[in-house]
């Protein structure tokens, strides 16, 4: 199995034409190149200028300006991990840029029969199974275009979106 990595993986986010959706199922992610210092600052209660996220936020704004949507559902466990708390804080900026992130309790995701792995669905035609190392570092994405597999993930996307809630609703629910 060949994995898309680096620029080839990033190209997925520049080339979709209508929609991108991600199901995030992990309690922790490690992006050594850009998230380790912001996570450390967050845990220390230090301010963050979000400069490390500027490329993504600008990309999201551009997609939205051209009528393309980016949506995500984050499946979360209780109690929250440090990374989940960090992600909730950062999501305020993502959502403001148009990266629509919603939340779903892990027990509800299990009840719904959602898969326990991360994936992106682009334009309802291209599925990217996201692979990680044992220490939570992104390894790359495996691309699948089989219509039945893509269709099943489209159904899971709709189910996850329907049962998830906005960041604000999630935080206000006492999660």
Image: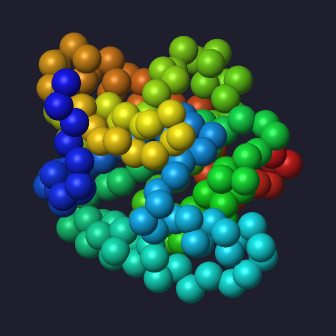
Which residue sits at x=34%, y=42%? 139
Which residue sits at x=67%, y=24%? 108
Question: Looking at the image, can residue 126 be seen?
Answer: yes
Question: In the displayed structure, does residue 74 sit left or right of residue 99?
Answer: right
Q: How many marks?
A: 0
Which residue sits at x=52%, y=23%? 116
Question: In the displayed structure, does residue 78 sit left or right of residue 1?
Answer: right
Judging depth in this view, the residue of 135 and 46 nearest the camera is 135
Colour scheme of this structure image? rainbow
- Whole-percent x, y for residue 46 in the image: 73, 81
Judging depth in this view, the residue of 30 and 122 nearest the camera is 30
Quadrant position of residue 80: top right
Question: Looking at the image, can residue 65 be seen?
Answer: no
Q: In the picture shown, does residue 74 fall above or below 70?
A: above
- Whole-percent x, y for residue 127 in the image: 25, 32
Which residue sits at x=50%, y=33%? 134
The quarter in which the N terminus is drawn is top left
């Amino acid at each position: 199995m060949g994995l898309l990595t680096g620029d080839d993986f990033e190209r997925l986010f520049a080339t979709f034409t209508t929609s991108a959706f991600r199901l995030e199922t992990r309690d922790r992610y490690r992006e050594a190149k850009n998230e380790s210092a912001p996570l450390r600052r967050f845990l220390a209660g230090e301010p963050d200028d979000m400069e490390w996220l500027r490329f993504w936020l600008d990309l999201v704004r551009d997609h939205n300006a051209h009528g393309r949507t980016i949506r995500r559902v984050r499946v979360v466990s209780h109690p929250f991990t440090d990374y989940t708390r960090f992600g909730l804080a950062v999501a305020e900026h993502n959502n403001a840029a148009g990266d629509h992130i919603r939340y779903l309790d892990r027990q509800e995701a299990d009840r719904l029969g959602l898969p326990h792995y991360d994936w992106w669905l682009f334009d309802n035609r291209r599925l990217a199974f996201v692979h990680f190392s044992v220490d939570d570092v992104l390894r790359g994405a495996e691309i699948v275009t089989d219509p039945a597999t893509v269709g099943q993930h489209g159904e899971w996307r709709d189910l996850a979106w329907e049962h998830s809630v906005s960041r604000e609703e999630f935080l206000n629910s006492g999660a």
